[in-house]
């Protein structure tokens, strides 16, 4: 697993900055990407959005007065497993 801070980066997917973006824009980008590429989408209990087959989870992190996106990269099996989804680290993540 690789967890990143929302102010460290850049980390991109198809030219979209996964790190430090507006969470609403990040979620829309992932939904569009999933529709175009046939990725599996999963919302976690903390309202993070994941592309499970890429092992990518996009979270929301408060940085000062704004919320920004930090990505979390995990093995695909972690996002497919109820146990692992319930035990993903939440440090630095806020809704």
Image (tube, rainbow, N blue to C red):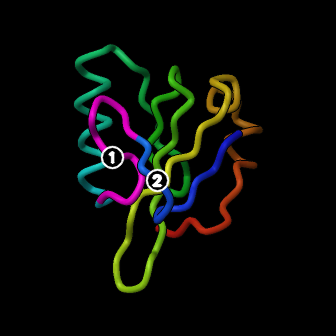
Mark 2 neighbour density, 10 Å: few (under 14) some (14–19) many (20 or more) = some
State the extent of the magenta-drawn residues as a range.
12-21
Residue 78's x, y, as percent? 70, 31
Q: Which residue is mark 1?
A: 17
Q: Which residue is mark 2?
A: 9
Q: Main secondary structure of the magenta part?
A: loop
Query: Which circle, 1 or 2, is nearer the viewer?
Result: 2
Q: Is residue 49 left or right of residue 66?
A: right
Is residue 77 positioned above or below 26 on the image? Answer: above
Quadrant including the N terminus = top right
| Distance between the alpha carbons at the discs numbered 1 and 2 | 8 Å
Is residue 23 positioned above or below 50 on the image? Answer: below
| SS at circle 2 | loop
Q: Is residue 63 left or right of residue 3?
A: left
Is 95 a magenta residue?
Answer: no
The quadrant where residue 38 appears: top left
The quadrant where residue 40 appears: top left
- Which of the marked residues, 1 or 2, is nearer the chain's N terminus? 2
Labelled pair 1, 2 in contact (Cβ < 8 Å): yes
Residue at the (42%, 53%) spot, across then down: 19
Residue at the (56%, 65%) spot, across then down: 93
Residue 25's x, y, as percent? 24, 52
| SS at circle 1 | strand
């Amino acid at each position: 697993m690789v967890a990143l801070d929302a102010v460290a980066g850049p980390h991109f997917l198809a030219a979209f900055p996964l790190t430090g973006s507006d969470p609403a824009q990040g979620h829309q980008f992932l939904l569009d990407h999933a529709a175009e590429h046939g990725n599996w989408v999963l919302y976690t209990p903390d309202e993070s959005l994941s592309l499970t087959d890429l092992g990518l989870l996009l979270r929301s992190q408060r940085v000062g007065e704004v919320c920004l996106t930090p990505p979390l990269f995990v093995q695909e099996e972690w996002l497919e497993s109820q146990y692992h989804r319930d035990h993903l680290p939440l440090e630095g993540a806020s809704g």
